[in-house]
Image: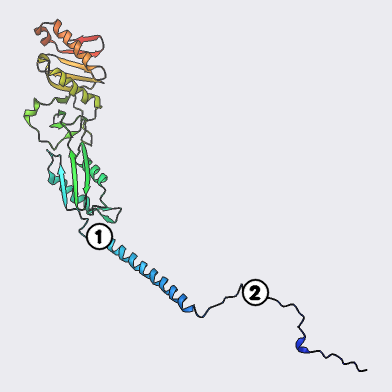
Amino acid sequence: MFIRKRQKNKNSRGKFKKKIKKDYQFKSLNNPFFRVKKNKETKSKKNRKILKFIIFILGILALIYLIFFSMVFKIRTLDISGLTRINNEAIEEFMKTYQEKKSYLIFPRTNIIFLNSNDLAEQIKVKFKLSQAEVKKKYFHKLFIILDERQISFIWRDDQEVVYSDINGCLIREALFSDNDLEKYPILLSDTNINYLEDNDCLDFRPEYFQAVISLNDRLIKIKELKPKSFILSSELNSLIVDLEDGPNIIFNTKEDLDQQIKKLLIIKQERVAEDFLALEYIDLRFGDLIYLK
């Protein structure tokens, strides 16, 4: 009996081995049918970016033109109101000087957008010593400048000049002095040769002195026999001298109640005959119930 040996087939060598499934997860597969579409989308995105960049550059150029070259926002008209002593031309000349400088070192002040209205108002107020100043914009090329001059409160007189002053003791030189106003405003002077005028053109006295001048003048002019001729700033602390047109000098304490001091003065006047009152050199009301007469 013949036993036929089974011949091994080399082609069936791996027939019974386990098959391994291929993993395509980390492989890049390109579909040749969609390659053209993808290239078109990439090119379209690139074109949009270029278009946006061009629009951005054109916007910057347009903005530069509007700011530096265009007349659209250029200030052409000034509407100035509220002045009686100062000429409008003086404000206009100041504006020309102001606009020669730049805002933030680069932006022209001739452009209404970049003009700082608060800064301009403050500079006009300081320059011309005004009570109030306000600047309003009206687009696209007009400015309203509303000004308020300081009110004259009294006349300051010394050896060198006679000039108006406001309630704070700051001189108003732009107002031309008139002799007719000597009857209209109280006159303030000093009893010493000391120069009380500071570099800012204001008198170096506390505000209550000037307020006392105005208050006493308003009260005394209503009393015929006590009409003030002038007010004298005394070198003594808190002292203000009233030089009457007819009668003695009256020394007031600027820190005490002025009405009470006037009442004491009226009592003294009533208790004396006219001749005796006019013959007095001074009446000192500064020390409460103690009254000194000479």
- The label nearer to you, 1 versus 2, is 2
x%, y% of residue 5? 87, 91
Kind of residue sitting beneath label 1: Leu
Question: Looking at this view, is 141 or 69 the one in front?
Answer: 141
Which residue does the numbered mark 2 point to in the structure image? 23
x%, y% of residue 246? 9, 15
Kind of residue sitting beneath label 2: Asp
Confirm whether residue 20 shows in the render.
yes
Give the residue displayed 25% in from the left and 62% down from the top.
Answer: 65
Give the residue displayed 27% in from the left and 63% down from the top.
Answer: 62
Q: Quadrant of residue 148?
A: top left
Tally of numbered tags? 2
x%, y% of residue 134? 22, 42
Mark before the other along the chain sequence, 1 or 2: 2
Separation (CA) of disc 1 from disc 2: 63 Å
Q: Secondary structure at mark 2?
A: loop
Give the residue displayed 62% in from the left and 75% down from the top.
Answer: 24
**Furthest-left residue in this view:** 180
Q: Secondary structure at mark 1?
A: helix
x%, y% of residue 236? 24, 20
Question: Looking at this view, is 26 or 199 the one in front?
Answer: 26
Query: Tag on residue 8?
Result: none
**Furthest-bottom residue in this view:** 2
Which residue does the numbered mark 1 point to in the structure image? 66
Q: Quadrant of residue 199?
A: top left
Residue 208 to residue 283: above or below: below
